[in-house]
Amino acid sequence: MRMLCLGLVGVIAVSGCKTAQFKGGVSNRSNITNPATPTMDNTVAPTPKGTAGTPAAPGATGTPSPAGTAATPAAIPANSAITGATKNPDGSTTTNAVAPDGTATAVTTVPAGPTTTVVTKPDGTKTTTVIDPTGTVTATTTKPDGTVTTDTKKPDGTDTVVVKNPDGSVTTSVTTPNSDGTSTNVSQNGDGTSTTTTSTKPDGTVVIITKNPDGTTTTVTKQPPGTSTPSKSTDTFVNCPEFPDRMILAKLYQLPENSSKVPDFAKVKYLKDVCLKQLDVVDRDFKEGFPGIPKLVEWFALDINWRVNAPDDGVYTFYVNSDDGSRLYIDGNQIIDNDGLHEHLEKTNTVTLSKGWHSIHVTWYQGPRYRIALELFWKRPGAAKREYIPTTYFARPTF
C-alpha cells in the first residue's frame, strides 16, 4: 500500500512539472478544468497539402509556416498583438488581435472554405472581408452613421460597389475590364436620376458619359497629363483647327464672380478661341466645360463673330434666347439687347437687309452655374415661321 501511494505521488509530481514548464511557472491549483472549446496560443490552419497558414486578406502579406508549425494569419496587422486563438467546433480557427490604436482584428479560417476577417475600429466602423475558395473577395463596411458599403471583387477583375445610405438611397457602381485593355465603370443612383459611364483606356484617357435626369447626355474626355483634349463632333464648343467646317468663331473669356452683364472684353481675361456649328444651345445644364478647360462652367463670356449670306432683300425678324445676358449686332449695329443676369429669356427685333454677306456679332455671358441657353433664329421675308439660320449661309469672319 505504501509503495502504491509513493507511485501516485510521483505521477502527480511529474504532471505538475510538465504543467509548470508549459506555462512558464509553478501552478498551485489542484484542479484544472478544460474549456468547452480548446484554446491555442497560435492558430494552426492546415492547408490541403498539410502546411499551416491562413489566406491573406486583400492588401496583406505573409509567408506560410512550415508544415506542422503554428502560423499567425497574414491578415493580422504586423503592429497588432495576438490576444487569443480558438479552434471552433466546426473545425475552423479564429485568431484575435488588437493594434495599439485599439483596432480589433479577428480572422476565421475554415479548412477548404472561406476566410473571414473582421476589423473593428475604435470609432465603431466595422469591416468584414470574406475570401471564398473561388478567389472572390467581398468586403462589407458599416459606419456608425448607418452607411453600409459592400465591395465585391471577382477573379475576372469585375468590381461591384453598392452603397446603402441612411436615408434609404442606394448607389451602385460596377467596374468591368474589357478585352481591349480598357475598363468601364457604370455608376447609377438608386432612384435612376443619373447614370455615369467612365471608360479608362490603356493610355490613360478617361471618357465620362453622364445621362442626366432631364434626358440629356454629357460627355467629358480627360487626357493624360501633357496631352491635349481633342474635340468631338457632338461637342457644342470645339477647337477651331480641328473643325474647319464650323464657321462661328468665339473668343472665350473668364469673368469675375457676380458679374451682372456682358463685359467690356478689353478688361477681362482672354482664355482661348472656340468654334460652334450653330447658335442652337437650348436651355439646359452645362457641366462639360470647354476643350482643355472642362471645369469652366460658370462666370465666362463669349465674343462671337461670323458672316451670313442673306438670300433675299427685305425685312428679317431676329430672335435671341439666352441665359444669361446677350446682345446681337448686324454690320456693327445693335439689333437686340437681351443683357443682364436672368434665366433663359427671348427678345426679338426686325431689320432690313440687302441680299448678300453681312457680319454677325453676338456677345453672351454665363453667370452662376449650371443652366445655359444661347439660340439665334431668323424669319426671312415672306416666311411663315422662324428657323435657325441655315449653316449653308455661314462663313468665317474676315477680321
Image (cartoon, rainbow, N blue to C red):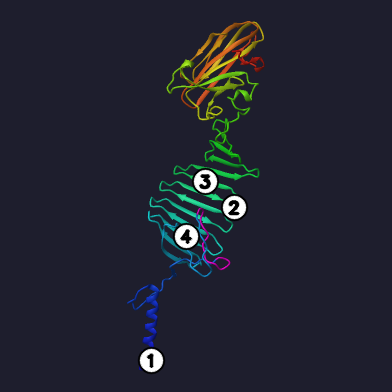
Q: Do the numbered discs 2 and 1 sit on residues whose CB atoms are within 8 Å?
A: no
Q: Which mark is residue 318?
A: none
> Depth check: 146 or 42 in front?
42
Quadrant location, the C terminus: top right
Mark 1 Cα-neighbour bin, 10 Å: few <14, some 14–19, many ≥20: few
Q: Main secondary structure of the magenta part?
A: loop
Q: Residue 345, can we see it?
A: no
The disc at residue 155 is 2
Which residue was labeled with disc 4?
107
Magenta region = 47-59
Q: Which residue is mark 3?
A: 162
Pick the residue in front: 6 or 128. Answer: 6
Looking at the image, tell me whether mark 4 or mark 3 is earlier in sequence order: 4
Q: CA distance from mark 1 to mark 3?
A: 72 Å
SS for callout 2: loop
Is 106 above or below relative to 11? Answer: above
Indicate which label's residue lies in the foreground, 2 or 3: 2
Quarter occupied by the N terminus:
bottom left
Looking at the picture, does residue 29 appear above or below residue 61? below
- Give the SS element for disc 4: strand
Lower sequence index among marks 2 and 4:
4
Q: Amino acid at mark 1?
A: Leu
Amino acid bearing label 4 = Val
Outermost residue toward the bottom in this view: 1
Q: Is residue 42 above or below residue 166?
A: below
- Dot 1 or dot 4, earlier in sequence: 1
56 falls in the magenta region:
yes
Dot 1: element: helix
Residue topped by disc 1: 4
Q: Residues within 10 Å of mark 4 (few under 14, many from 20)?
A: many
